[in-house]
Image (cartoon, rainbow, N blue to C red):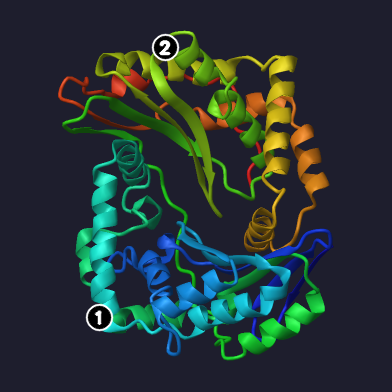
């Protein structure tokens, strides 16, 4: 049973009681991410995430780690472009301890100057690791070109310059302005009692400030173009994509099915035609990334330098085919069943269900049942796919990035011509 309510401070709580399990996953989710940062503070949300594990006013970093280990807990955290999350999975009997640990981290971080200096070195190494990982680098280059001059295009980690400038006082100012009650969602799933947990959450987070910060982020404009980088590596890495729909768009389920058909499964067109039929790449896939007001559909492939142009041409051929001809009934059936299976299999543990609750609350302000999600996927038709493909695969809207050895061909705009579409634009959000 799913229950949700908003506490007087503005803090939101959403829970799902699953009586037949013995675990509980509980998380605190922040509705702010890297897109809400200023240029000078690029990377600060991710840095604060790191610092919340470096001790509180009453617990050292070692104390936090030992207490989590002593109850067999699993803890993790992340920062994305639009939100951040901190969560612990424990046996149901240890839920009060998990809540105490989370609230201490989220309310009373030490942000000690010596820990800030130490963690700057860690994050700087993390930034270097991206530079040395070409399949990550090519995606960062793609995003920076795709959303040039917009926070969504900036790396979540920030830059060496911005991270090096962070101080304890600067982090605390960001923390106090951002980690306020209306920006936070507490989500929990597992063997729990909602009323008991609500009272415990209200007590644990009673010092949260109820003031709402102002979200000044504006929708981004896409900047089509190409960016190339030569590196001393063996393989070339290609990322190309187009604007897509937001996470609240009426066609979001059709876009998910479209992505599955294009490159989201082993039987997808890209995997079969580029890897299986021609042996051009070991890794090739497409990805649909949706945000509150925009989205992107991108394709990645790692291939030999002399195969880059062929891989790009084949990918564009799939774009054209999807906007030109309705998908066959058996292909549509296979894609919908794959997507429905992925959704349900991903929700077979309390951590996944907790994350699902939080994302539904942050994105929609309400909960959608799994039956509704499955029905929405099932309702997608071949004409829906054709219409969305016509909206997404527009000529002159393609962005691409390539990282490869010296012999990798330098791509030009002429490599990315789709030709005019005969379809009209579809529904909007």
Residue ID at (80%, 52%) = 369
The percent coordinates of residue 155 (x first, y second) are 34, 53
Q: Which residue is mark 1?
A: 114
- Residue 2 located left or right of residue 125: right
Q: Is residue 234 above or below residue 99?
A: above
Question: Can residue 398 be seen at all in this image of the molecule?
Answer: no
**Kind of element beneath mark 1:** helix
- Residue 134 located left or right of residue 92: left
Q: CA distance from mark 1 to mark 2?
A: 52 Å
The percent coordinates of residue 250 (x first, y second) are 69, 44
Q: Nearer the viewer, mark 1 or mark 2?
A: 1
Q: Quadrant of residue 328?
A: top right
Front-most of residues 107 and 379:
107
**Kind of element beneath mark 2:** loop
Q: Which residue is mark 2?
A: 279
Question: Can residue 97 be seen at all in this image of the molecule?
Answer: yes
Q: Residues within 10 Å of mark 1 (few under 14, many from 20)?
A: few
Q: Quadrant of residue 260?
A: top right
Residue ID at (60%, 19%) = 267
Q: Is residue 279 above or below residue 345?
A: above
């Amino acid at each position: 049973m799913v229950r949700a309510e908003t506490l007087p401070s503005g803090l939101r709580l959403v829970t799902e009681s699953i009586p037949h399990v013995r675990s509980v996953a509980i998380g605190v989710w922040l509705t702010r991410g890297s897109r809400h940062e200023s240029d000078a503070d690029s990377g600060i949300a991710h840095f604060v995430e790191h610092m919340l594990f470096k001790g509180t006013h009453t617990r050292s970093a070692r104390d936090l780690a030992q207490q989590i280990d002593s109850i067999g807990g699993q803890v993790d955290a992340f920062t994305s472009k639009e939100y951040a999350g901190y969560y612990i999975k424990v046996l149901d009997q240890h839920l009060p301890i998990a809540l105490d640990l989370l609230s201490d981290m989220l309310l009373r971080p030490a942000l000690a100057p010596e820990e800030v200096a130490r963690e700057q070195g860690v994050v700087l190494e993390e930034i270097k690791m991206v530079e040395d990982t070409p399949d990550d680098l090519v995606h960062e280059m793609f995003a920076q070109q795709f959303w040039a001059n917009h926070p969504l295009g900036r790396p979540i980690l920030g830059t060496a310059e911005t991270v090096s400038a962070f101080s304890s006082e600067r982090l605390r100012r960001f923390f106090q302005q951002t980690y306020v009650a209306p920006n936070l969602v507490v989500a929990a799933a597992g063997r729990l009692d909602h009323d008991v947990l609500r009272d415990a959450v209200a007590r644990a987070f009673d010092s949260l400030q109820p003031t709402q910060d102002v979200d000044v982020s504006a929708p981004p404009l896409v900047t089509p173009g190409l960016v190339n980088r030569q590196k001393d590596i063996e393989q070339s890495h290609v990322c190309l994509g187009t604007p897509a729909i937001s996470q609240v768009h009426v066609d979001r389920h059709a876009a998910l099915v479209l992505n599955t058909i294009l490159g989201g499964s082993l039987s997808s067109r890209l995997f079969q035609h580029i890897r299986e039929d021609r042996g051009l790449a070991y890794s090739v896939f497409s990805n649909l990334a949706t945000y509150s007001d925009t989205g992107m559909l991108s394709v990645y492939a790692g291939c030999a330098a002399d195969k880059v142009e062929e891989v790009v041409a084949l990918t564009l051929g799939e774009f054209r085919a999807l906007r030109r001809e309705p998908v066959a009934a058996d292909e549509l059936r296979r894609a919908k069943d794959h997507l429905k299976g992925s959704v349900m299999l991903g929700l077979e543990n309390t951590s996944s269900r907790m994350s699902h609750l939080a994302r539904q609350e942050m994105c929609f302000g309400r909960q959608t049942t799994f039956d509704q999600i499955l029905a929405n996927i099932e309702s997608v038709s071949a004409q829906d796919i054709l219409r969305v493909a016509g909206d997404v695969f527009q000529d002159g809207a393609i962005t691409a990035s390539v990282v490869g050895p010296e012999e990798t061909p330098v791509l030009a705009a002429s490599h990315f011509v789709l030709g005019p579409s005969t379809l009209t634009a579809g529904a909007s959000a």
